[in-house]
Image (cartoon, helix red, strand yellow):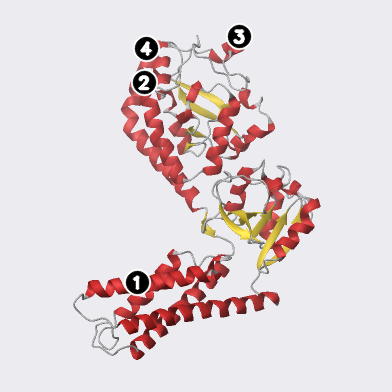
Amino acid sequence: MAFNSIPTTRPKPDLRSSTSIFFRKGITIGSVRVATFVLLDAISIYLSWQLAISYGTQFESPWKMTQSSLFLPVVIAVGIGVIDARGLYKSGKYYRDYIELIKAVSLVNLFLLLIAFLYNPNHYISRSAFLLFWFLSVTSVCICRVGMTYFVSLLRRQGVIRRPVFLISDKSHQEKDVQLIEQENCYSILGVADSSSLDRRNREATFESLQKLGVVEVFASWSSIKNRLYLCWHFQTIGITLRILPTELSFSLPRSGFESIGNIPSPVIRAPIIIGGDYWVKRGFDFCFATLLLLVFSPLYFLIALLIKVDSPGPIFFRQTRVGLHGRHFKVWKFRTMVANADRLQATLEAKNEMKDGVLFKMKDDPRVTGIGKFLRRYSLDELPQLFNVLVGEMSIVGPRPLPVRDVQRFEERHFIRQEVLPGITGLWQVSGRSDIDNFDDTVNLDIVYICSWSLQLDMKIILQTVGVVLQKKGAY
């Protein structure tokens, strides 16, 4: 299947954001499957318990339903909870793992014995009833699973309740990959494309086409994504699960788990159940946190402004053009820490650049820095005005640092991943060495780690680490 370029006029969003908040694609099918198994297990446990109580040794006991209506819901709830905790409602081979199912139901019986003892240790508990319940529950739950599995398999052979999927693989491997996917007897392959469909020039059209087709999962070969790991976010933000086809190579992917296809373990990167929620929580946090900090630090702003005016002639703030999300230019706000004509003087200092590859300009004893500027830089106080950039949506609290146009013009192709997400005031680079890192590739690698592994928890961790790094003045100049 070939994709045609689809023009778009709307501005591109952050790599991790979704245009709207919605449930993961295919969740309805999965929810119906889980609900069906839960219902069958509940019915099996209910009937097993009733038969065990009826045909076991007859003793007056609070466990009898004639005396209490509370115990049967407890029995069912414990049974469903233990089975779920053992992962036996997951898709794939998990719900057909009958050995684990027997262990789970047996564990349910042990829990019930413990509950019965703690409820009334002096009251006789019918051992025959519990033994009968164990046998009946294990047998009925397993029989229901076997019957349901056979019924689903029968429907899938008729082309019903199959998950719509798409294959992205090298042309030389597509036939073999199609055969591997069809072995599972639960997928409908809606189309096939080669690895070039994920190239920068083609990917937007690819993802729009996948959405129009109603694809729930995409199978991709390792060669298709090995140099494009950040593409996982594109799949996640449109709610599509990405499955990496099995390979003989050993590798790891962030945010992935392993499932089997053709009895071979392969990485699976699932979209979250609610798409877009985490990112918009991040943006809401950015706005609220920036507003709070501006209010708290307002006296400090006035003090810094006064010191700058006393220290050297020139404006209080320094506004420099930086390259932000998807290459868009914007003005970043900082307290001025250099002499007024610092930009013009940089050309005369390029030979003293301490960055080995020359992409960034870093100089430890930069003669352009003013006296108060050195103090502001040491404690990163010069960055405080960038909270205004956060408020207007040009930056985030945490993200890759926005770089000057001069630096971005020296980027290689692989460096542009930094421009796929909203830039930040602090980031993994800042808490991992700051200015002591003298190779731009090292900073890009840290940015890639952040982008691929991003989560709300990671952002909070970086914010807390930033406080420690600033107070210790690590790598600041």
Of 207 and 41, the residue lying toward us: 41
Q: Earlier in the sequence, mark 4 or mark 3?
A: 4
Q: Element type at marker 4? A: helix
Q: Which mark is residue 110?
A: 1
Q: Which residue is mark 4?
A: 310
Amino acid, disc 3? Thr
How far, Cα to Cα, is label 2 from label 3? 29 Å
Instruction: Please determine whether, in this image, residue 215 is positioned above or below residue 335.
Output: below
Disc 1 crowd, CA 10 A, few/some/many (<14, 14-19, 20+) = some
Q: Which residue is mark 2?
A: 304
Query: Is there CB contact under 8 Å for labels 4 and 3?
Result: no
Residue 140 screen position, x and y as percent: 48, 81
Of 64 and 426, the residue lying toward us: 64
Residue 209 screen position, x and y as percent: 71, 56
Q: Earlier in the sequence, mark 2 or mark 3?
A: 2
> Which image quadrant is residue 271 in?
bottom right
How far, Cα to Cα, is label 1 from label 2? 67 Å
Residue 324 screen position, x and y as percent: 57, 34
Disc 3 crowd, CA 10 A, few/some/many (<14, 14-19, 20+) = few
Q: Element type at marker 1? A: helix
Amino acid, disc 4? Val
Camera-near label (3 vs 1) is 1
Q: Element type at marker 3? A: helix
Residue 30 screen position, x and y as percent: 55, 68
How far, Cα to Cα, is label 4 from label 2? 10 Å
- Residue at the spot 53% in from the left edge and 72% down from the top edge: 32
Left or right position of 174 against 240: right
Q: Which residue is mark 3?
A: 348
Q: Earlier in the sequence, mark 1 or mark 2?
A: 1
Where the N terminus falls, by quadrant? bottom right
